[in-house]
Structure formats: C-alpha cells, structure tokens
Amino acid sequence: MTELPLIARARAHGSAIAFATKTGTHTYQNLLDHSAAYAATLLDDRGDLQEARVALLVPAGFEYAAAQWGTWRAGGIKVPLCLSATEGEWEYALTDSGATIVMATAALAEKIGPLCRRLGVRLLVTDAMTAAPASGSATAKTLPFVTPERRAMILYTSGTTSKPKGVVTTHANIQAQIESLVAAWEWSAQDRIPLFLPLHHIHGIINVMSCALWTGARIEAFERFDLPAILGRVRADAYTLFMAVPTIYVKLIQALEAASPDDRTAVVGGFARLRLMVSGSAALPASVHEQWTALTGQKLLERYGMTEIGMAISNPYHGERRPGAVGQALPGVEVRLKAETGAIITAEEEPGEIQVRGPGVFRAYWNRPEVSAESFDDGWFRTGDMAVLERGYYRIMGRLSVDIIKSGGYKLSALEIEAALLEHPHIRECAVIGVPDSTWGEAVAAAVVLADGTTLELPALREWCREKLSYYKIPQRLLVMKELPRNAMGKVTKPALRAGF
C-alpha cells in the first residue's frame, strides 16, 4: 500500500523518539501505531472518510500528532481548533467547515461536548482511543490510499478584519512547505526542538512539528509557554533549535535581565549553543533583534509567511541576518512585488504588494470561490502585504489595510514608526495605526504600554521623535494602555485600538 510520504518516512525512524514530555517519551513507531488506531476508529464502518472534516481540540504533543496523522490516514481533512476559543468561535469553525467529527482530550471534551450534542457532531475522546495495536502487527482495518492531491487541512485565518476564512491546503502543499524549510534551515534527525506554540496556526503545525517529524527529530512538547521550565531546559542544552514569536523573545529578554548573574550566565550559554533561533508570525522590531544578539550572541533568523502560503521569504541560515528585514525567497518559492499601477517592480526601494506562487501555496478558501478568485493575480497569490527590496533583502512595510497609513499624501509604514518608538526608554510595547483626520486624511496614532513607574505625554513624545522620524511620521495622537489587545498568536489586533482614539 502506497502511503503519504510523511507516514512512510516515519517508518525509517521507528525506534527514535518523536515526542518527549514530563510523563515520558513516544517513538515514531508509537506515533504510527496510535495514528493507525485513531484512523480505524474514525473510519468506523467506512472504507474512506472521503475528505470529511475532523476538528481537533487537543493540546500540543504526541496525542495531537497522532490525531492529525489518524485523520489523514483515514482520508479526512483536519480542522484545528483554538484551545482557548469561545464556544461561539468553535461553533463558527465547526459549522463553516461542515465538520462531522470532533476529537478532543477528556478535559476539553467536557467543554465542547454540549456544543457537539447541539450540532449533532460526533465527539471522540482521545484518552479512550489509545489502545493502539502492538508494533508491527496488522491493524484491524485496512486504511485507504490517500493521494498527495487530496485536501488535508483547513486552517482559519485570525479574522481581525472580518469573519475568519478557512484556508484549504492539500497534502502536496504541506509537503512542499516542509521540504522548503528543511532544505533552507538544514533540519536533521539529530535536531531537538521545544514546541509551545498553538497548533491551530501554521507556525507550530508546519515550521516546528511537521518539519521535525519529517526529518526524524525530537520534539519536547509543552501545553503552553512555560517560561521557567523552558529556560531550565535551555540551560541543560536540551535543544538545537528554537522557534518563537516576537512577544516571547521580549519575555525572554525581561526574564534574563531580571535573573541573578549566575543564572543569566548559565541560560545565556544554553541559548548561545543552539544552532538556530527563528522569529516569526509578527514583525520582529529591530531593537529586539539587536537586544537578543547583544544578550546571547545569537542572531535571530526572521522569516515571512502566512496561513495561505506557508513560509515564502527567510533570512539565510548561512549569511547575514539583517535586523528589520525578512530576507530572500525560500527554495521552491517565487516572490514578486507589484505596484498599485499594475507594474511589476524590478528596482530596489520601490514599495509594492508581495505576491507569491509555488507548490506550497494554498488551493482556495473553503466555500468562498469569489474571495478565492479575487485573492490571485494570474496565478500569483496576493498577500496584501507591502514590502520593498533593499540590498537584495525584502523589508516588510505592513499590511495594505492596517499597517500602511496614508497621511498628508505620504504612505507611512506603521511598523517603521513602531520600531522607532520602541527605542524610547519609557515605552515597553506599542502599536501604531492611522485614525481619520480632516486635515491629514489619516493621523498617526500610537498606543503604548509604558515601563513600570514611568509616564509619558504626547508633547514630550513628539519632541523625542524629532531626532528619530521625519516630521510627517511623528505620532499626532497618544494612548497609554495597561496592555495591548492581542489574538491567540500574540498579534496585536489593531482594529480593536481604534475605539480608544
């Protein structure tokens, strides 16, 4: 029986450890056995799920991977659910995708159970499905042949500006995304990586978990970002790679700065010995990049991607990792910039929309043919992100609709202004948006979180900015907040800030 390459490759790693947790370890053979048992339960009296949607409500770890592989081996489409979502958000994902089955742990099954009963959705509890067949024995059920062209996953976008859209990827799309990163970042079976990112997002699913399992590497899973535990493991040289979002790097910097000299030295030494550290899912301020390098000696590798395309652009594994830039196109990915006039940009330092094509680009949004058609330009996916090419590297200017501010005839990058504001000694976090203004069209408005014990008024901020920013980029409005509104991935939800101004 021909298998999906991800499954076939796991057989070669049989006795190697795939997952390590506080309670023990699980080999690749364990993963194969458990996923086969899950697939058999999912199939019930059918021979093939025929792309039925199976929603997963399972924390990061071995059970999640087994449930994902079980869904795929049974011929289903996986729909990851956010563990911390509201019931209304779960209901939207289930009804929009047409999911007929939910797989959840016992604890989470209690929470989603009433909704499943109301919607008539079959609920399977993973804790009761772990009676996997012994290694090497035949499964009780013959599993279907699943081709790479089959649809594999529906990932819902963050939905900060509208209702979330289901991004559909095939097994072939996912394989292309994995192979591109494995080649670019030189993954191997000797790698060890922590997994604490949410698994309803492409960063955790593809960049960490899938790349590791493709190469036979070891994953140490955490149900959430456990700062003390992770710092302890870094100190013990438990990892070779580390992937996180910018907010986590900010927390790590704060923790290291607050640690005793001996503890700081030990943990910094652990970080310094990692072969690669990656930042993504949101823009990494250049100031944080530089702080991390000064503190640990590690130059963070920043990359650019999104749910619809996987990863498209990356700073190099070998070569300059430039703060404020996301690098160059990854292997197997084509990238171009297109101006508002429709011209393809070939010169450097001319802004344009990033457009991407390649085997990793998604097929379509679930049940949204018109939106899907509008999202492509002659086969190129329109990302909605603006960028410029500077000395061969792409620099992201921001979203066309959120991070590009049109003020006084200028197109301003909110990310650029944010990076400057973060250099202010009193500003710990910030988000910049454009707000309607009768004179400027849009006025630059900054929401900030201040360092403990500090204050800041707009006139003082504007005066400080005069040496940092052109006059037309200096904030005209200031809002001091205790914390910025964020979604589950730690991204600031800028539309939610507008009411404050």
Image (cartoon, grey):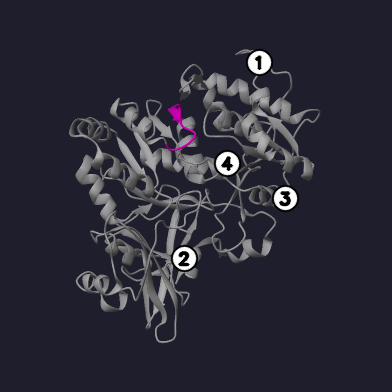
Q: Mark 1: which amino acid?
A: Pro
Q: Is residue 261 left or right of residue 153?
A: left
Please rate how many residues cluster around mark 1, counting C-alpha atoms within 10 Å: few if below 14, some from 14 to 19, many from 20: some
Q: Residue under label 4, please give it.
A: 83
SS state under label 4: loop
Sequence-earlier tag: 3 or 2: 3
Please rate how many residues cluster around mark 3, counting C-alpha atoms within 10 Å: few if below 14, some from 14 to 19, many from 20: few
| Label 4 – label 2 distance at C-alpha | 25 Å
The label on residue 133 is: 1
Q: Residue under label 2, please give it.
A: 497
| Label 3 – label 2 distance at C-alpha | 29 Å
The percent position of residue 206, horizontal first and vertical second, equals 49, 41
Please rate how many residues cluster around mark 2, counting C-alpha atoms within 10 Å: few if below 14, some from 14 to 19, many from 20: some
The percent position of residue 331, horizontal first and vertical second, equals 41, 47
Q: Mark 4: which amino acid?
A: Leu
In the displayed image of the protein, which residue is found farthest to the front? 453
